[in-house]
């Protein structure tokens, strides 16, 4: 045990008020999680499901069980941005990924982002995503002329090698038109 004073965070955690607030927040998070997993036709879900889902997303504790039985996802997804510069050169931006072991928590958010940014129901994300990708190349020798967002998918076979991805350009941002 140290002889100096406790840091403010530890003093707060040890106080009755701090313990009460932390307990309340954990209980609230659990209730929100329960509310988001109730059947969609339940009275509770109809009253608080939308709000609970918003808070769960804000807190970053959203859960999706699509990889488990009885209906696991049978398709692999990917997304990339193909960048064309004014001088005709190109670059391809892909989602960050880390080492095979130990990177799941750090890079999982990118996979969740991928599911959202490539969906037709989220077309409002496409232009800001293309502009963000273009901004990653601000230091390039030639200015960015065009960004194409490309989604890829393939059906996952039960046995054997994975087939190649089928690519589809789903959004194009032409920056040459803006500069003219």
Image (cartoon, rainbow, N blue to C red):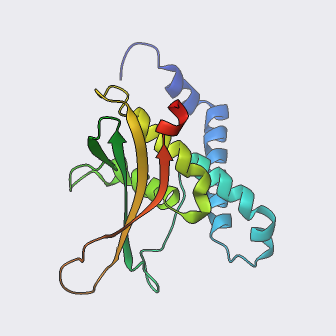
Which residue occupies the foreground of this view, 39 or 73?
A: 73
Residue found 53% across the figure and 54% down from its top: 61
Could you say where residue 24 lies in the image, as x and y percent from the top left?
A: 67, 46
Tell me: residue 115, above or below residue 70.
above
Could you say where residue 109 lies in the image, as x and y percent from the top left?
A: 43, 51
Q: Quadrant of the N terminus?
A: top left
Which residue occupies the foreground of this view, 49 or 173?
A: 173
Which residue occupies the foreground of this view, 104 or 146?
A: 146
Tell me: residue 76, above or below residue 179.
below
Tell me: residue 10, above or below residue 36.
above
Residue sticking out furthest to the front: 180
Horizontal side, residue 166 vs residue 40: left or right: left
Residue sticking out furthest to the top: 4
Residue 167, quarter of the rendered image: bottom left
Q: How many marks?
A: 0
Could you say where residue 37 lies in the image, as x and y percent from the top left?
A: 62, 70
Residue found 28% across the figure and 84% down from its top: 157
Residue found 52% across the figure and 58% down from its top: 116
Could you say where residue 143 lies in the image, as x and y percent from the top left?
A: 37, 30
Tell me: residue 11, above or below residue 114.
above
Which residue occupies the foreground of this view, 169 or 12?
A: 169
Horizontal side, residue 95 vs residue 174: left or right: left
Residue sticking out furthest to the left: 160
């Amino acid at each position: 045990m140290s002889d100096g004073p406790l840091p403010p965070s530890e003093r707060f955690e040890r106080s009755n008020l701090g313990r009460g607030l932390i307990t309340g927040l954990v209980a609230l998070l659990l209730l929100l999680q329960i509310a988001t997993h109730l059947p969609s036709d339940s009275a509770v879900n109809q009253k608080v499901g939308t709000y609970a889902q918003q808070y769960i997303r804000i807190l970053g504790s959203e859960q999706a069980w699509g990889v488990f039985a009885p209906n696991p996802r049978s398709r692999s997804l990917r997304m990339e941005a193909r960048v064309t510069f004014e001088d005709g050169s190109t670059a391809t931006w892909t989602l960050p990924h880390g080492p095979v072991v130990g990177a799941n928590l750090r890079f999982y958010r990118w996979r969740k982002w991928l599911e959202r940014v490539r969906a037709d129901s989220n077309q409002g994300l496409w232009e800001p995503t293309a502009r963000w990708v273009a901004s990653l190349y601000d230091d390039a020798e030639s200015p960015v002329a065009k960004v194409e967002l490309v989604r890829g998918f393939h059906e996952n076979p039960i046995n054997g090698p994975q087939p190649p991805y089928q690519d589809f350009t789903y959004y194009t941002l032409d920056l040459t038109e803006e500069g003219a």
